[in-house]
Amino acid sequence: LDAENFAEVVMSKNFSLAQACAYFKCNLSSQALRDLEMLLDEEIRSIFLYDDAIEVLSALRNNGVLIGLCSNLALPYAHPVDLLLPFELDARARSFEVGCVKPDVGIYADICSRLRLPPSDVLMVGDTLIADVEGPRVYGMQSVLLDREMKSGMAGTIPTLHALLPMV
């Protein structure tokens, strides 16, 4: 199993780090597992929202825009990410709950269903070309690449979330 497939399995299963180790038959000592848990906790504590996120999400919400999260995310990250958000989202499609990862169309279908909107009425914003732009477009969604350093050179790319406000 290569690293990409390993990550896909971990993000598409609803299990903890210990359960992932059991699933992959890792023969780790209890100390090694505790060390991994500590590293995972450290990484989770390093997660943050960009400065523009709360302001833009709040402005969109105040303008009546439904807001969802469609994310390749492993279970241990879910609650910490939710705590960073300024309010309860209208919908979530997290890979560990849906059972597939972006760019699988199943995750896009799930978020559209949860938002109760047809794909053509949903705008996906993300920082990964295949998972957040091309995949949603294949499913019929609108999409925008968030490239904070504007290195992609792709048309329709935005440098900050503030650029979304005139679009919706």
Image (tube, rainbow, N blue to C red):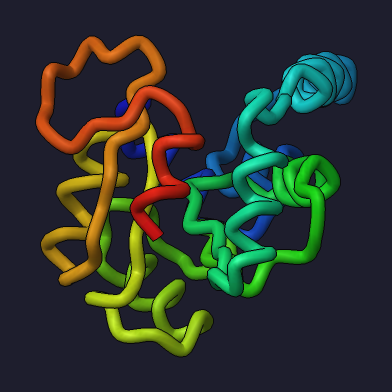
Q: Is residue 135 left or right of residue 18?
A: left
Residue appearing at x 43%, y 85% in the figure: 113
Tell which of 127 and 29 is nearer to you. Answer: 127
Quarter of the picture holding the N terminus: top left
Task: Name the residue at the front extreme.
Answer: 166
Residue 28 vertical placement versus 146 (above, below): above
Residue appearing at x 16%, y 48% in the figure: 134
Q: Is residue 117 left or right of residue 70?
A: left
> Residue 3's quadrant in the figure?
top left
Residue 90: image location, x then y, percent: 64, 73
Q: Is residue 38 left or right of residue 8?
A: right
Tell which of 29 and 71 is nearer to you. Answer: 71
Numbered label tally: 0
Residue 68 vertical placement versus 159 (above, below): below
Residue 158: image location, x then y, percent: 32, 31
Residue 35: image location, x then y, percent: 83, 14
Q: Would you say residue 16 is visible in this rendering? A: no
Residue 84 vertical placement versus 89 (above, below): above
Residue appearing at x 45%, y 27% in the figure: 160
Residue 18: image location, x then y, percent: 75, 40
Residue 25 vertical placement versus 26 (above, below): below
> Residue 147's quadrant in the figure?
top left
Quarter of the picture holding the C terminus: bottom left
Tell which of 34 and 26 is nearer to you. Answer: 34
